[in-house]
Amino acid sequence: MLWKALGRSLALACASAMTLSSVTVAPAVAASGSQPPRLVALDSNQPDPEKDARVKAFDRFLRNRVAEGDFLGISVAMVDKGHLSLVRGYGRRSQTDGGQVDDQTVFRIASLSKAFASTVAGLMVKEHFVDWSTPVRQVLPKVSLGASRNNVTVGDLVSHRVGLPHNAYDDLLEAGVPPAEIVSRLSQLSLSCPPGSCYGYQNVAYNLVAPVLEARTGLSYPDLVQKRIFTPLYMHRASIGMEGLQKDENWAHPHVRIGEKRWREVTVKPAYYGVPAAAGVNASARDMAKWLMAQLGMAPQALPHDVLEAIHKPRVNTPKELYRARPRYEGVKAARYGYGWRTLDIDGVEVVWHTGVVQGYIAQIVMVPAQKSGAVFLTNGYSPTFHSLMPAYLETFVDGVKTRGLVLDGFPSKALIAARDAEQPITGGE
């Protein structure tokens, strides 16, 4: 079993100290052209020996999972108590070319892109270009979501409180219908609830935050993200769009499973690149380590604390995620969505997270801001094992989170119920 494998790795791990990497964050470039804030250094100090043993165990665990065929390729970044403790790639970029995944290999991150959009929006709110309460129709008068949704705000967009059915018209997006045409059809859908009052996950509607920001700043959405996030955080390999994914050979090709342990490479599907605010970002584990540290509050000149508080704050209940979480974790009290981020209250520990799925890729980010800890997992093929990574991470590294199930390394454990392996991958952008 997966958890027994991790338990064996933990038992074998030594407690010797491990050299931690340091990350430097470049000056943020103000949209107004004003003097950028000074450099912020994200440095590590001496690691805790116990934590070091856990890092080594997790590293061995991932190597074993790749060796046994659970993943073709996976790249991981971990931050433990404010220090970068692991950033590494495992396995292969492609079934055919044999190239190895490393910390610079670029993956599609799918719906992890949503937090980039909400973060940029938060920066623009702070600088008074727009407000969370600004009606979309006020900025985009030619865009109608239907008369009953004319009061939809920017905050509603990025918290999925638009009043549309879940994943509205994702099927049209996947069929190749241009996003602008799909937006024009959204007004034809019935109201699922009054705007601002309930959750309905979106990709096409979520992406409307991009033209809102473009209209208010005069910059294209990709340029805005580059200027306000990629450049100040030194995310050198991060990009938006298919060209950015494939700009050099070190990118992870998408794959689907054939049977239990075999893989078949597939072509990159462009549909979700058409909604860049919802699913358009590509990045490496090294890039995402910097993003993770910034989201944990370690780059306040680039991402101020009040912006992070606003986007991480829970805004709306997500009943389906609550149902999924209860069999996995002890003491789950709430599952909600903020601005571009999911949240879980696990026995008083606030976990902020998101998953992203497009064909051939699945990615996940999880963090506990109060503990300055988090992890990112990027893969180039769906595996049922993937659903165990976040619980395994929380079990091993986060204080106060207990998962349900078996015994891990001799202690009362916390593993996923057996049914988690039967879950099916989500189609489209999660």
Image (cartoon, helix red, strand yellow):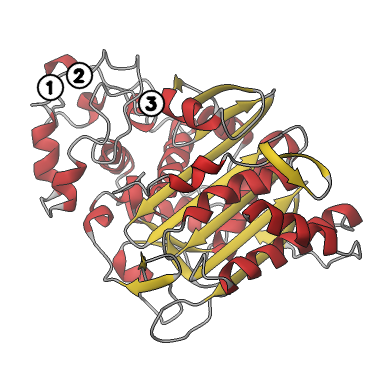
131 sits left or right of 212 in the view: right
Q: Quadrant of residue 47?
A: bottom right
Q: Residue at (41%, 87%) from the top-left corner?
A: 97
Q: Alpha-carbon distance for marks 3 and 2? A: 13 Å
Q: Which mark is residue 3?
A: none
Q: Residue at (42%, 52%) from the top-left corner?
A: 225
Say few, some or many: other residues with alpha carbon within 10 Å of mark 2 (under 14 / 14 to 19 / 20 or more): many
Q: Residue at (74%, 41%) from the top-left corner?
A: 398
Dot 3 or dot 1: first in sequence order is: 1
413 sits left or right of 382 in the view: right
278 to 370, vertically: above or below: below
Image coordinates of residue 429 in percent, x first then y, are 33, 47
Can residue 338 be seen from the camera position used here? Answer: no
- Badge 2 amino acid: Arg
- Badge 1 amino acid: Gly
- Total numbered labels placed on residues in the image: 3
Image coordinates of residue 311 in percent, x first then y, are 51, 32
Can residue 258 be seen from the camera position used here? Answer: yes
Query: Label 3: which residue?
Result: 155
116 sits left or right of 304 in the view: left
Tag 3, which secondary structure? helix
The quadrant of the picture occupied by the C terminus is top left
- Badge 3 amino acid: Gly
Tag 2, which secondary structure? helix
The quadrant of the picture occupied by the N terminus is bottom right
Q: Alpha-carbon distance for marks 2 and 1? A: 5 Å
Image coordinates of residue 348 in percent, x first then y, are 69, 23
Q: Which mark is residue 146?
A: 1
Q: Are marks 3 and 1 in contact (CB under 8 Å)?
A: no
Dot 3 or dot 2: first in sequence order is: 2
Q: Are marks 2 and 1 in contact (CB under 8 Å)?
A: yes
Image coordinates of residue 421 in percent, x first then y, are 49, 48
